[in-house]
Image (cartoon, grey):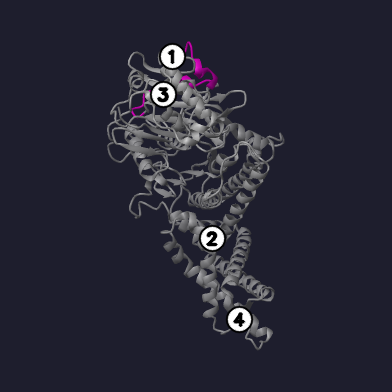
């Protein structure tokens, strides 16, 4: 059997070399700056030998030199990795022609880039087509592309493993609409929407906490705690620091706090892999994980090794680079079309955004999917991976736009690839697909009212407002509201503030903190310091409600026209929270109990009829607070696993999703997440 495998591998290598030789001959005939003969001309045999030697040298250099180059490229920001692929691949071709023993062959540098790209793509397609004919060869190829370091001879459990793929930002309603419209045939087949075959999966909607964003949700799913994560970004007075969930240092600190609170290492602590996530989940195998990005490189920190695992194959690098530049062109065309069509609402999509979008929708997707396929073929017990493509595009194009339909199609193809790899895995797998939140559409707060939340807070605090905001009708409206609240003719005649507030935005959730006050301020203290601020915010038409601490009632919700409801009375009279639907009261109460909740929590206006909100950031599809589809993600699970929630209860909170996934791991006979050392005391 070993000799047959070696013989098959040699046969495939010879075939790829022959196809590459023919490709080089064809390109030499088509491209004027590429020739395989001397200026005086050569025989057909001599030209063929030159092409064969050149193709062989190029293939050998790609196999030996390319991995070294990729190792060096790990020092380059990942966003610009695709920009260097063509240059390096073309350089290898120039070197191959120079060392060609025939002494023939010349190519212009710009033409070398084209020739190298075509040859790499053809070689990859040929090798893949030959390998697919043999299941063992197909598995070995995928295993090599994913750079698995586990030896194939190691024993693998026969019990099923669990692989979870997170489609970042895809809400329950978006998924059902995509299945209905034929955008996601793989998911439609699992749900048997055609009624021909029986379903293999069930679809469940779940409800996020107030902070409907990846940082809180993924921390809860992977580590079982969303405690003290009030938003995507917030100010911590005791540390004098702004925490941002997608900042490596903040992610590492949040993961440490969650592990200390739960006393557990995470969902993936036993033979797990974490791919493309903010947090590790306690996994031993990690790639593109933000919370370990600040550590010194070593065996325990291979966050960027996923790039090497994928790009060490030059054909992968070329294919992804081509898709990268195609996505940049697609974004430019789509944004130009939206601008000329007068699309409304619309946000700016220039600058580096086309490159950011291409990285999220192409590079990150390709690397993560390849890593997951390698994990399946290595037989890992639990895998959790995040695909961020939809979330990135929906922020700028809208959660139901034509642009995101193409992204959903490609995400479905990624699920099909993972499903195919699972068929070749050494153990059975249960494939779970879920999202961390949805997205709600709507015009931005700044676009609708002509000023930012920071401008409104400054106006209410008696601080200067930028001239641009002051000239807009909304800026005048804010100043008028301040005058009415103060009962004065001029808002600027109030007491001089001792410190400017810190105003942060997380989608349609705003946070206002006063850094010079060490504790969380009460409503009474805020009114004494800035008499017009709370009234100005609560009465603004773009604001849904406020949450502040109260010396008399512990906490109160403020709304327009003097509405003030203690948290203890929200069940009987929810006031402005009524329009935000079930679960809003509990979510607000829970956030109020967090140690680092801001002095003023601001949730934007929400229209329950249209589902629209006003983001305090420049996003026409946003999430982070309460209101609409952003709080309604999905959980797609195999029928062979137990129901997520019994008795028709709504699955609420990422912490609850964590416990469901742990239960499923137990059903699959997977051991779970003990810590090796005693945990730190739980947070108060």
Indicate which disc, 4 or 1, sits on the residue closer to the N terminus: 4
Q: Secondary structure at mark 2?
A: helix
* Residues tagged 4 and 2 counted as in contact (Cβ below 8 A): no
Task: Determine the residue positioned at 59% across, 37% down.
Answer: 399
Q: Secondary structure at mark 1?
A: strand
* Residues tagged 1 and 2 counted as in contact (Cβ below 8 A): no
Q: Is residue 549 left or right of residue 58?
A: left
Neighbor class of circle 2 (other Cα within 10 Å; few <14, some 14-19, many 20+) is: many
Pointer 4: what residue? 50
- Distance from the alpha carbon under mark 4 to that under mark 2: 26 Å
Indicate which disc, 3 or 1, sits on the residue closer to the N terminus: 3
Label placed on residue 565: 1
Q: Is residue 425 left or right of residue 47?
A: left
Task: Determine the residue positioned at 54% across, 81% down.
Answer: 100
What is the magenta range?
571-596
Number of the front mark, 1 or 2: 1
Pointer 2: what residue? 317
Number of the front mark, 4 or 1: 1
Neighbor class of circle 3 (other Cα within 10 Å; few <14, some 14-19, many 20+) is: many
Q: Is residue 76 left or right of residue 402?
A: left
């Amino acid at each position: 059997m070993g000799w047959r495998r070696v013989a098959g591998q040699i046969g495939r290598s010879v075939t790829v070399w022959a196809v590459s030789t023919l490709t080089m001959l064809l390109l030499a005939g088509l491209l004027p700056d590429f020739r395989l003969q001397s200026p005086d001309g050569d025989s057909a045999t001599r030209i063929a030998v030159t092409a064969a030697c050149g193709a062989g040298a190029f293939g050998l250099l790609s196999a030996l030199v390319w991995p070294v180059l990729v190792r060096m490229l790990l020092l380059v920001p990942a966003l610009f990795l695709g920009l260097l692929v063509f240059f390096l691949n073309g350089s290898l071709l120039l070197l191959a022609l120079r060392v060609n023993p025939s002494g023939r062959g010349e190519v212009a540098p710009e033409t070398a880039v084209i020739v190298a790209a075509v040859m790499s793509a053809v070689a990859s397609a040929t090798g893949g087509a030959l390998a697919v004919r043999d299941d063992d060869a197909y598995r070995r190829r995928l295993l090599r592309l994913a750079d698995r370091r586990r030896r194939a001879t190691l024993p693998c459990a026969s019990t099923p493993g669990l692989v979870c793929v997170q489609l970042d930002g895809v809400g329950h309603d978006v998924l059902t609409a995509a299945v209905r419209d034929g955008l996601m045939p793989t998911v439609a087949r699992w749900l048997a929407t055609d009624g021909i075959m029986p379903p293999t999966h069930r679809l469940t909607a779940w409800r996020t906490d107030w902070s409907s964003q990846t940082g809180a949700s993924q921390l809860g799913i992977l580590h079982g705690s969303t405690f003290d994560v009030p938003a995507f970004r917030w100010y911590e007075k005791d540390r004098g620091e702004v925490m941002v969930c997608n900042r490596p240092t903040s992610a590492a600190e949040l993961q440490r706090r969650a592990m200390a609170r739960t006393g557990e290492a995470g969902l993936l602590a036993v033979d797990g892999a974490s791919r493309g996530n903010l947090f590790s989940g306690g996994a031993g195998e990690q790639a593109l994980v933000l919370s370990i990005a600040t550590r010194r490189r070593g065996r325990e920190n291979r966050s960027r090794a996923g790039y090497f695992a994928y790009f060490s194959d030059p054909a992968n690098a070329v294919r992804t680079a081509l898709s990268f530049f195609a996505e940049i062109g697609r974004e430019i065309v789509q944004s130009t079309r939206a601008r000329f069509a007068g699309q409304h609402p619309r946000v700016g999509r220039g600058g580096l955004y086309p490159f950011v979008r291409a990285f999220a929708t192409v590079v990150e997707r390709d690397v993560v999917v390849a890593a997951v396929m390698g994990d399946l073929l290595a037989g890992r017990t639990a895998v959790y991976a995040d695909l961020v493509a939809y979330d990135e595009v929906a922020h700028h194009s809208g959660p139901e736009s034509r642009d995101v339909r193409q992204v959903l199609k490609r995400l479905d193809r990624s699920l099909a690839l993972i499903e195919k790899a699972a068929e070749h895995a050494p153990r059975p797998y249960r494939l779970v697909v879920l999202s961390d939140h949805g997205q709600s559409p709507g015009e931005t707060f700044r676009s609708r009212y002509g000023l930012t939340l920071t401008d409104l807070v400054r106006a209410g605090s008696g601080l200067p407002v930028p001239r641009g905001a002051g000239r807009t009708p909304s800026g005048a409206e804010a100043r008028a509201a301040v005058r009415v609240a103060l009962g004065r003719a001029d808002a600027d005649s109030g007491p001089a503030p001792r410190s400017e507030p810190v105003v942060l935005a997380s989608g349609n959730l705003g946070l206002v903190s006063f850094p010079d006050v060490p504790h969380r301020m009460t409503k009474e203290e805020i009114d004494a310091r800035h008499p017009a601020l709370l009234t100005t915010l609560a009465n603004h038409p773009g604001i849904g409600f406020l949450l502040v601490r109260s010396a008399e009632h512990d906490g109160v919700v403020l709304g327009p026209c003097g509405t003030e409801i203690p948290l203890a009375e929200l069940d009987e009279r929810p006031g402005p929270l009524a329009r935000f639907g079930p679960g809003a009261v509990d979510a607000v109460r829970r956030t109020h109990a967090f140690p680092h909740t801001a002095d003023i929590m601001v949730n934007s206006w929400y229209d329950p009829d249209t589902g629209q909100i006003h983001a305090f950031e420049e996003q026409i599809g946003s999430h982070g607070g309460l209101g609409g589809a952003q709080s309604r993600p999905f959980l797609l699970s195999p029928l062979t696993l137990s129901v997520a929630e019994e008795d028709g209860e709504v699955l609420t909170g990422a912490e609850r999703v964590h416990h469901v996934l742990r239960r499923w791991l137990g059903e699959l006979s997977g051991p779970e997440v003990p810590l090796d050392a005693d945990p730190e005391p739980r947070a108060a």
